[in-house]
Structures are given as C-alpha cells and as structure tokens.
Amino acid sequence: MAEIAKIEVNGTTYEFPIITGTENEKAIDIKTLRGVTGGVTTIDPGYKNTGSCESGITFLNGEQGILRYRGYSIEELAEKADFLEVAYLLIFGELPNKEELDKFHSDIKDQSVVDEDIKKIVDAFPKNAHPMGVLSSLTSALTSFNPKSVDVDSEEEIYKAVVKILGKFPVLVAWTMRKNQGLPFRYSDSSLGYIENILKMMFKKPGEKYIQNPVIVNALDKLLILHADHEQNCSTSTVRIVGSSHAGLFASISAGISALWGPLHGGANQAVLEMLAGIQEDGGDTAKYMAKAKDKNDPFRLMGFGHRVYKNFDPRAKIIKVSADEVLADLGIADPILDIAEGLEREALNDDYFVSRKLYPNVDFYSGIIYRAMGIPTEMFTVMFALGRLPGWIAQWKEMRVRKEPIGRPRQIYVGENLRSFVPVEKR
Ligand code: CMC
C-alpha cells in the first residue's frame, strides 16, 4: 500500500504521498502543498530537511558513513578505478569499456587547448589574486569563447560539451597556479595520462625535465576520485540552480566554483592548513585550540571537523589518511603539522563536545597535508578540490537539464515592514 503523510492545517487534514528511494530513503512529496492549502508553504533554512531533487548519481548515508557513485562504493572506486573512469561513470551512468574510455580520453585531449586570448585575461589579474576567484572568472570566460548553448536533447552535443570542459579546465587550473608563481604558461602534453598531464602542466619548470612520481600520481588520482561528487552539497546545488535557469554549462560551473570557495565548504582544506600552521606557530598547544573550538563565545571552529551529512567518520577521510601516510613516507617528509593534526584528531575523538555532536574529521582534514607535500601552494588547495568535483558538477547539471527540471525558485516567509507611505527625503 502506498504510504502517505497527513498534515493538518487549521483543522483541515491534507494527505501527501511518501516517496521511497532505491536505498529506502523516504520523503514527503509536498509538490501540491501550496495549491491545496491556499498558500501555506514550508520553511527550512539551510535545507536540512529538504530534498531538492531525485537523483541517480550519488548515494550518501551520513549515519553509516556510506558514499557510493552510481552504486559503486567509494572504497572500491578509490582502490580500483582511475579518475577518468569515475568521471565517465558519474556523467554517463555506467563504467566505460576500454574502447569508450580510450575515446573519452582522446576526445578530452583534443579539447585541451584554450584560446590564446585567455592568457591575456589571466595576465590581467594581480599576481596575489586568490586562485579560486581567478578560476571562477576564467571558467565563466570560457562561455565567451564558446558561446553556443548546448542542446540538451542531443546526446552528441552534451558529450562534446563534457569533453570540452574536462579538457580545458586543467589548463585553467595550471595557468592559475603558474600566474601566481610567475611561471610561463604551458600547454597540455597529449602523450600523458590525465593526471600526469595535470602535474606536468602545473609543475614543469622552464629548462628542467619534469619527472613523474607514481606515488604522487596515484595520490592525486585518488584525491580527485574522492572529491568527484557528493550529492546535493552547496556548490552542486548552486550548479543545478544556476543551470535550471538554462544558463550554460560553463557559467553554471563557474557559479559552483564560487560556492565551493567558502571556508565552510571546499575552502575548508585551505583553512585547515592555515589553522594547523597557526597552532604550530603558537607553540603547538592543541588543548588551547580545542578549548577555543568548544567556547560558544569564540568564533573559532576546528576546521576539517564536522559535516552536514556525515554523523560518523567521513569515509573519504579514512582513505585520504592512508594516502597522506604513503605520500609523506615516499617523499621522506616528517611534517610537524601532521603531528598537530593527529593530536587534534585524537583529542577530538575522545572529547565529549565533539563525540556528542558527532563531529568527526572530514575529507578536508587530511587532503591539505597531501597537497602541501606535493608542493601545491595553500591557496591552490580549493582549486584542486574543484578539479576533482568537476565531473560531479557536470553529471548533476546534465541530470537536471535532461530531466527538464523546473527553474529553482524557493519561496520565503516575509517578515519585513507592512505597507507604509513614502516619506520625501526632506521630511525623514
Ligand atoms: N568545531 C567546533 N564546533 C563545531 C564544528 C567545528 N568544526 N562543527 C560544528 N560544530 C558544533 C556547532 O557549534 C553546533 O554546536 P551546538 O549544537 O552546541 O550549537 C553543532 O556542532 C552543530 O553544528 P552546525 O553548524 O549546526 O552543523 P552544520 O551541519 O550546519 O555545519 C559544517 C556543518 C561542516 C559547516 C560545520 O561542521 C563546520 O563549520 N565545520 C568546519 C568547516 C569544515 O570543515 N567544512 C568542510 C566540510 S567537508 C567538505 C565539503 O563537503 O565541503
């Protein structure tokens, strides 16, 4: 029998269907609420109880610490797949066969050139501009160089747009970093794998041969896979809502980058490293910072802890921690910042404040440590997150457009002034 929910408003009872997802998640379908009740709506700031869409891309169970892309566990994908396979899986729904994967990679390579005029835009930014602002602007600028909108009824057109952005985005990422460091811009090397190419574009110094380190290639591949999608988070919801107005793919992704920038979202990886460095400079007293994090009169929060959805260990944090150990061991780095991170983790996991609020280390707690060991500047950490999240944003944009979802337009409850008469300036 179909399940229903009853809502009583001023003595009248209304019935609404309950919909059940493939993992048995339940939601009250209130699509008809305003119509049948004569204008009553719901209010849910931060959307803690609101499902914005039905989606077949990523399943997340925060209580049990489960994350799956298209039904495959994140643990298995991080161990067995590479980033491009995961990107294909997220965007097109199934793992590619060898032929599809080779074609996908080759088509991406063909698209990994950006218009020379984009260099002028990069050059116009101040050297110390935050790379997330630069990346968001450059991604938006891609729209001007590729003005034709994508016909979402054509699989071929969608495919072309997908390989275009997957090809060009790493170039923008590399140029953003190189501008910051005063290095000349480099183009893609089509003889390389996707990850190796990104590393070379970012790090190759003029006149020096760039030597790939397989441990670093593997760690970056894994980091990008772990970041590739996370259902309806702040930046993904932004991409969907901007795309729902039929703004183009590049413009929607650019908006997602801006949303990701904030320290409560993707910017947390930069904030974690800055926090750890600050604690180190202040003498390494982790107990002092634990106390600050718990003090309600102190705005300080333990960055890299807590998550809107995970009320258990973030499964990505577990995988990243192992990766961080591997990278540091391979590079022979004894990073005192890692000791501080481990100290904070130990203390938080045994502290009633953190335990009772189910605040565990999240994906960003350890990712910054790996990026730092790889030689990536701190301000670039969130850019690396964006590089990983790109396939997720594309997949979510595509799902929303192909399903012809309506424009996103939430309601509000107005709590401002009632009607009043205008007072001329001289009488105010
Ligand atoms: N340090 C200290 N206290 C915290 C923290 C923290 N990092 N996170 C949450 N709390 C407390 C918060 O003060 C509140 O306490 P109380 O119930 O006494 O008022 C309680 O825990 C619940 O917090 P909330 O802010 O209502 O939870 P939320 O779901 O709105 O926020 C969060 C989730 C991730 C924004 C938050 O935990 C946070 O600010 N964490 C630090 C930033 C961070 O690491 N962000 C990266 C998230 S993972 C990457 C991504 O997907 O973007």
Image (tube, helix red, strand yellow):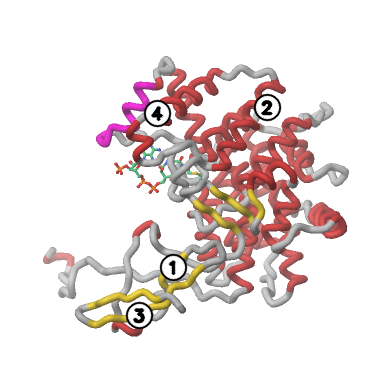
Label 2: state its secondary structure.
Answer: helix
Q: Are marks 2 and 3 in contact (CB under 8 Å)?
A: no
- Please give the name of the residue rendered at 75% of the width and 65% of the height, measured from the top-left corner: 159
Q: Quadrant of the C terminus?
A: bottom left
Which mark identifies residue 326? 2
Q: Is mark 2 within 8 Å of ligand 1?
A: no
Check disc 3 and give the amino acid type: Glu
- Please give the name of the residue rendered at 38% of the width and 57% of the height, measured from the top-left corner: 46
Disc 3 crowd, CA 10 A, few/some/many (<14, 14-19, 20+): some
Label 4 sits on residue: 350
Q: Are marks 4 and 2 in contact (CB under 8 Å)?
A: no
Q: Relative to 19, does residue 133 appear above or below in the rendering?
A: above
Q: Nearer the viewer, mark 2 or mark 3?
A: 3
Q: Relative to 272, does residue 123 appear above or below in the rendering?
A: below
Could you say where residue 237 lies in the image, as x and y percent from the top left? 50, 60
Check disc 2 and give the amino acid type: Glu
Earlier in the chain: of badge 4 and badge 1, it is 1
- The quadrant where ligand 1 appears is top left
Q: Nearer the viewer, mark 1 or mark 2?
A: 1
Q: Relative to 264, does residue 417 appear above or below in the rendering?
A: below
Apparent side of residue 148 relative to residue 264 in the rendered image (left or right):
right
Earlier in the chain: of badge 1 and badge 2, it is 1
- Residue segment shown in magenta: 287-297
Which mark identifies residue 27? 1
